[in-house]
Structure formats: structure tokens, C-alpha cells
Image: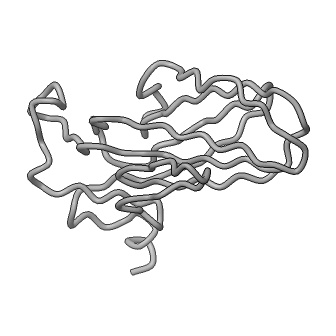
Amino acid sequence: MKTKFLIADEFRLEASGRHIGIGLWPDDVLVIQNGARSAEAGSDQNYAIERLGFLIVVSGLEEGTHKFRGTIFNPSGIAHSPDIDLGDLEVARGQSASVVLSAKPFVVTEFGLYRFDLQVDSLLISNTFEVRLKGQIQKNEAAAE
């Protein structure tokens, strides 16, 4: 099985079945501007990304119906939100399955490495992305200096 994990401000599905990504974060590092605090974040200590979309493409699945669930974990390892039921997807022979998840807003309670766990049936697939404040040095960049 092979997966692709993309993050953007938004993903849109075209009638042709293709996805359009707007505001792609190509290196999976989300940089928050200092002024990104908002009332929607629930606290003046939190930051919010106005909208955030995840596109997960899974190929190499067997033909049939597959159950998809997802969970995002913050850098402390605590679930960022409850498990997300992404539904059952019917996969035809030789086809891939695409799942889009949107968060409006995506509340940032801490900076660091987040983990997105995708469960396909009983298989767990993990992907990471980093959220940092503008001007912060990435941990592995600081170690190289």
C-alpha cells in the first residue's frame, strides 16, 4: 500500500474527479504569522489557521469497501480532536482512494510536530506535519548550526 499526504488551505473536487489544492504547504511545515490569534481559537493564548485541508490518497488497496478513520495528535501526543469517521469507500480494482478532510479553523494550541493517523480497516498509517510560529527555527535546522 502506498499513501500520499498533502496539506493546503483548501482542496476542491472537480467534476472530473481531480482535486485542486489552494495554498499548498509543500514541505508539511505550516508557518503561523504572529497576528494569527483569533477569537475562534477559544483563548488569547491559542492561534488559528483560518482553514486547513488534508488530502490523503491511498493506492494498492484490494478491491472492495474499506473503512477510513482519522485522528490528529498534537505535539504532546494528545488527540487534537475526536476520532473522525471518514466513511466507507468503495475501491475498484486498480484504483486509489482519496479522502479530504477540512478544518475551519484549525486551532493551534502548541507548536511542534503534529501527527495525522489514518486508519484504513485495521491498518494504521501515520503522517506528520510541523506547525511553527514565524521566525522559529526548526529543531533539526538548529542542530545543524
Frontmost residue, 6 versus 34: 6
Residue 65 located left or right of residue 144: right
Q: Position of residue 5 (x, y in %)?
A: 59, 53
Please identify the quarter of the rendering in which residue 137 is found.
Answer: bottom left
Frontmost residue, 66 versus 91: 91
Up/down of 58 relative to 81, above or below: below
Q: Position of residue 27 (x, y in %)?
A: 47, 66
> For the view shown, which residue lies furthest in the front direction?
15
Residue 78 located left or right of residue 1: left
Frontmost residue, 84 versus 13: 13
Q: Can you say which quadrant of the picture contains the C terminus?
A: bottom left
| Numbered marks: total | 0
Q: Position of residue 79 (x, y in %)?
A: 47, 25
What colour scheme governs how the chains and residues are painted in the rendered image of this protein? one colour
Q: Residue at x 21, y 62 (%)?
A: 134
Q: Position of residue 28 (x, y in %)?
A: 46, 59
Q: Residue at x 88, y 50 (%)?
A: 94
Q: Residue at x 38, y 71 (%)?
A: 142
Residue 127 located left or right of residue 38: right
Up/down of 54 relative to 89, above or below: below
> For the view shown, which residue lies furthest in the bottom direction?
145
